[in-house]
Amino acid sequence: MREGFIGSLNLVLPQMVLARIKSEPLFKHLYVTDMGYYPHASFHFMERLSPIDQYIFIYCIDGCGSYWIENSDGIREEHNVGANQYFIIPAGHPHCYWADKSDPWTIYWIHFAGSQAGAYGENRSTPFSVTPDVDSRINNRHHLFEEIYNTLMSGYTKENLIYSSVVLQHYLASLVFVRPYRGAVQNMGEKDVVEAAIHFMHENVGRRLKLTDIASYTGLSASYFSMVFRNSTGHSPLEYFNLVKIQEACRLLDYSAMRINQICYKVGIEDCYYFSRLFSKVVGMSPSDYRKRDKQG
């Protein structure tokens, strides 16, 4: 197994805390045991021939990978997974998963357990697609993941454990019950091309999009879309996408304890020096100065 990827997040709950959770009726029904985020996880490989008693949720937001799960008949069922797809490995089954060598995945992952874990974890062992759309709320879901992570990182108080359990339920339900999750914020009216493009940028802030990716989403040619977008916003689509990335970076600097080299990967920029230069150009100060300024009030 390879871990320690640049920009990664990793949290493992101590056994003493897990023992406490299992005896607590308020949150023993559904809880996190481990969770993390691996960007561009080259050489990521995990094989467990001895099954574990947790469900393993893996959500690929970029790149691709593969996995196999041994079914109850001892047959290994192998699948490939790509961007905007997730799967859940059921508890009690040998399994293996790995990143693609040429296009390694970027993944959110959660190990979870509890008396109600099966309600969310069963029958999800094949890849499920989360198709980006005007009402997909994909970025909102990523914020829920961060909320769970940041809550647990701030301490294992009873309140934090209860709250993380509730948010985990919301997070998993948003994937199992996609239609009501998307329908909870219906449009006030039909979105125009520019609004749809900006929504798409926010939904994919952690990816490296090309102009053709954004134009294709709107259904327009790249040249015509660029003209329409610039006339409306004063920026080219890719310039605006960089502004969206910096806006998200500011949010993470303000409200998370993530390191700067983690944040640049989180917003889809692998070159930390380029990220720092871009941030300084847009905001007028370096990321570290921005964070210090925020702390000083």
Image (tube, rainbow, N blue to C red):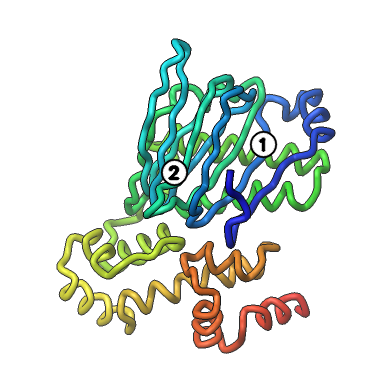
Q: Is residue 243 left or right of residue 25?
A: left
Where residue 291 appears, as percent x and y from the top left, is 69, 76
SS at mark 1?
A: strand
Choose the circle earlier in sequence order: 1 or 2. Answer: 1
Where on the picture, by quarter, is residue 231? Answer: bottom left
Query: Where 250 sits versus 180, above or below?
Result: below
Q: x%, y% of residue 163?
A: 71, 41
Q: Quadrant of residue 293?
A: bottom right
Q: Tell me if residue 287 comes above or below residue 198 in the rendering.
A: below
* Residue assigned mark 2: 184
The residue that appears at 31% across and 75% down in the rendered structure is 237
Q: CA distance from mark 1 to mark 2?
A: 26 Å
Residue in the foreground of this view, choosing between 98 and 176: 98
Where does label 1 land, which residue?
Answer: 32
**Quick check: 138 left or right of 194?**
right
| Residue at horizontal 43 percent and vertical 39 percent from the top | 86
Say what amino acid the circle numbered 2 marks. Ala
